[in-house]
Amino acid sequence: MRVLYPGSFDPITNGHLNIIKRSSKIFDEVCVAILNNPGKSSLFTVKERMKMIKDSCYNIPNIIVSSFNSLTVDAARELECSIIIRGLRAVTDYESEMQMALVNKELNDEIETFFMVADGEYSFLSSSIIKEIASFGGDFESLVPENVSKKLLEKYGRK
Ligand code: ADP
């Protein structure tokens, strides 16, 4: 069974990686797909984000990295995924995730959304908090994969 893990991944964090690793043990294949949303500004290009995901997941054999600029359910169908995986951090994630899952069900009732509860140690972690820490010169090295850490330091002119 192949599942879709969609998101912005701008950039991938240890929280995302935790969800990817756990899903890869449950399902045959995990397709990590970047939503290429031209209306939303991002720090990294889709190409850069894809490379960072591939490099971070180099030791996970059943991963596919992809991108899409369509409805998530359409991407799931095209990539032959019958399940969408989403991570749940705090209750604040619940409302928007619930809405999205219901909308996706309305659009295509053959695709299910599965939620995975974030591990406690990552429940505070988001790509935006990482970018904020990095932009103010704080320490973020323990919160993202090593290759991502290097890219962030380059982006913010610290290396
Ligand atoms: P989006 O912009 O669609 O929220 P993100 O890249 O921020 O995409 O997140 C993709 C998915 O990963 C979402 O389901 C989000 O809840 C989940 N996620 C993000 N950070 C973490 C984390 N620290 N632990 C677990 N899941 C997370």
Image: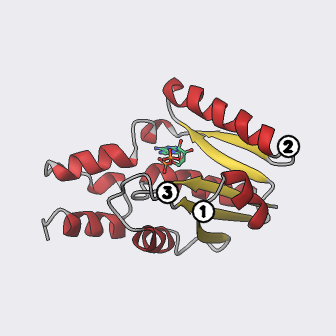
What amino acid is found at the position of numbered circle 1 in the picture? Val
106 lies left or right of 33: right
* Residue 90 place in picture, x, y as percent: 50, 28
Quarter of the image that includes the C terminus: bottom left
39 lies left or right of 21: left
Q: Is residue 124 above or below residue 148?
A: above
Q: Which residue is mark 2?
A: 109
Real-space Cα separation, disc 2 to disc 3, in angstroms: 24 Å
136 lies left or right of 110: left
Q: Nearer the viewer, residue 153 or 100?
A: 100
Q: Nearer the viewer, residue 140 or 8?
A: 8
* Residue 2 place in picture, x, y as percent: 77, 62
Quarter of the image that includes the N terminus: bottom right
What amino acid is found at the position of numbered circle 3 in the picture? Asn
Secondary structure of residue under mark 1:
strand
Residue depicted at x 53% and y 24%: 91
What amino acid is found at the position of numbered circle 2 in the picture? Asp
Q: Which mark is residue 32?
A: 1
Q: Which residue is mark 3?
A: 37
Real-space Cα separation, disc 1 to disc 2, in angstroms: 21 Å
Sequence-first tag of 2 and 3:
3
Q: Residue furthest right?
A: 110
* Residue 122 place in picture, x, y as percent: 44, 42
**Image quadrant assignment for residue 46:** bottom left
* Residue 88 place in picture, x, y as percent: 57, 36
